[in-house]
Amino acid sequence: MVNDASMGRRERKKTATRTAILEAATALFLERGFDAVTVREIADKADVTPKTVFAHFPRKEALVFSTEGEQRDRLVAAVRGRAPGTTVSEALKVHYLAEIALLRTEPMNRIMALTEDSPSLVEYAERMWLRHENALVDVLTEEFGLDEPSMEIRFYARFALQIPLMARQADPEPAMETGFRLLDEGWARYDPTRRRRARAGRSTRPPE
Amino acid sequence: MVNDASMGRRERKKTATRTAILEAATALFLERGFDAVTVREIADKADVTPKTVFAHFPRKEALVFSTEGEQRDRLVAAVRGRAPGTTVSEALKVHYLAEIALLRTEPMNRIMALTEDSPSLVEYAERMWLRHENALVDVLTEEFGLDEPSMEIRFYARFALQIPLMARQADPEPAMETGFRLLDEGWARYDPTRRRRARAGRSTRPPE
DNA sequence: CACTCTTACTATACCGGGTTTACTTTTATT
DNA sequence: AATAAAAGTAAACCCGGTATAGTAAGAGTG
């Protein structure tokens, strides 16, 4: 989105309103926390009607996560533009760690701190993230030269998107490592109760 | 929960109220659909205050899915009571198919039909289902003789619970098959772009 | 330039889920 | 018989989100 030049007064005013709302919201959220601020207050501070707020953002939560599109684009780019000879999983792992690092920089950091103690915000963030599933499925389908997404790709995408959610709750790097190892190599290697598999000659204890 | 004998008048009245609310809600939902019925109407029909409704059920959606506990118990039982020599994945697959079959019996069937066209209800059902993750982690930890859940178990539980959600959107049986195969055997077998893996001597083409 | 069409926005009332407060009734307890 | 705890009532209230009807300004057209 070009910022101002050649955009028509109308559109310029629109993005100005949007920015005003966003800034008012951010200021109030940082000051008092997400739940303690009402949409009416935000509208007042931005000098617009509550209706206008919802014309620009579908839900209150969207005022915090206004960069969903860019996040999705980065994800797709990470897969499509991965180094030659790199697997998708490796590319995703690197990308996830980079995203986590990004969230730790200012001013994202302070905004993320808000998220922690508002359940509705946590939930919204997760659902937003998982909405990238289709985009991931599409880029994988394309990368693998298929016309239609296979069931394997669908499952892979769904599982792979769960990994960073899981990793946030623990030490990210080793957790991510484990998640991708499981996803890439399969559960049968870890399951201590499994019978001998179709393929013979494998040890029963997990390696390492 | 014992139904009436030796429960004290108090508790008996309480469960009676709960039942009345539930029956009123179910009747109205089936008649007009989830979204078209307000909590006030349900309360009126059950001859209680709206407050009382929320004293028994945390959210409106919980009036439709009032059997969360039993669902979780069945899941745990399916893992714990699996036939000897059966892997967890096999047990889960069988259990999932049985649950789907269960949902197709009356009167669950009609209630489930409601769910389809109310987004909030679909979302609630999924989140409810995924809340069983901890229970699944716990039973796996116990079954594998561990004191603390391993990271692999956590990931397995999370992935495994995604499978039936995914399978509902397609033809359940083959989708489920694919999901568990991926989970058990790993993505590396399916990824057409992968390099040779770290561990040497493994063939690059999928066995079978 | 006058004309119309579209669109961002206003004002205001409204809806419905969910909570709060203060109070009453009923059951269990000592 | 006295008392404490639980369950429920009644009514106002909060807040996110929507609906309606209308205004005003920007943009394109003859």
Image (tube, coloured by chain):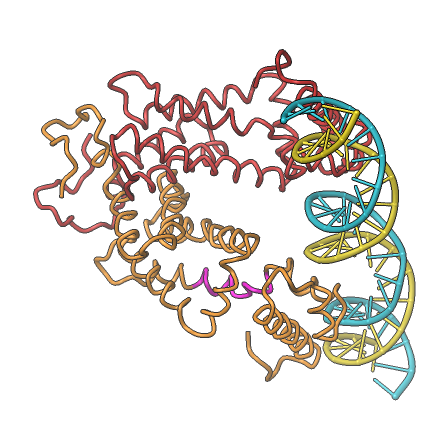
Chain colours: A orange, B red, C cyan, D yellow
Q: Can residue B49 be spotted in the picture? A: yes
Q: Is residue B32 magenta?
A: no
Q: Relative to B40, is C18 on the left or the right?
A: left
Furthest residue to the top?
A: B5
Q: Quadrant of the N terminus of chain B?
A: top right
Front residue of B179 and A176:
A176
In the rendered view, tell whether residue C5 sits above or below residue A166. below
Give the main secondary structure of the magenta stretch: helix
Give how far across and how far down residue B51 sits, in percent.
74, 38
Q: Quadrant of residue B124?
A: top right
In the rendered view, tell whether residue D25 sits above or below residue B48. below
> What residue is shown at x 12% (from left), y 31% (from top)?
A202
Q: Relative to A81, is B134 on the left or the right?
A: right
Q: Can residue B42 be spotted in the picture? A: no
> What residue is shown at x 56% (from left), y 64% (from top)?
A64
Q: Quadrant of the C terminus of chain B?
A: top left
Front residue of B118 and A155:
B118
Give how far across and how far down residue A135 sits, in percent.
45, 53
In the rendered view, tell whether residue B110 sits above or below residue A57. above
In the rendered view, tell whether residue B101 sits above or below residue C18. above
Q: Which residues are the magenta region? A: A62-73
Q: Relative to B166, is A62 on the left or the right?
A: right
Give how far across and how far down residue B38 sits, in percent.
77, 38
> What residue is shown at x 26% (from left), y 17% (from top)?
B84
Q: How many numbered marks are there?
A: 0
Front residue of B15 and B166:
B15
Front residue of A6 and C12:
C12
Give how far across and how far down residue D1 sits, in percent.
79, 25
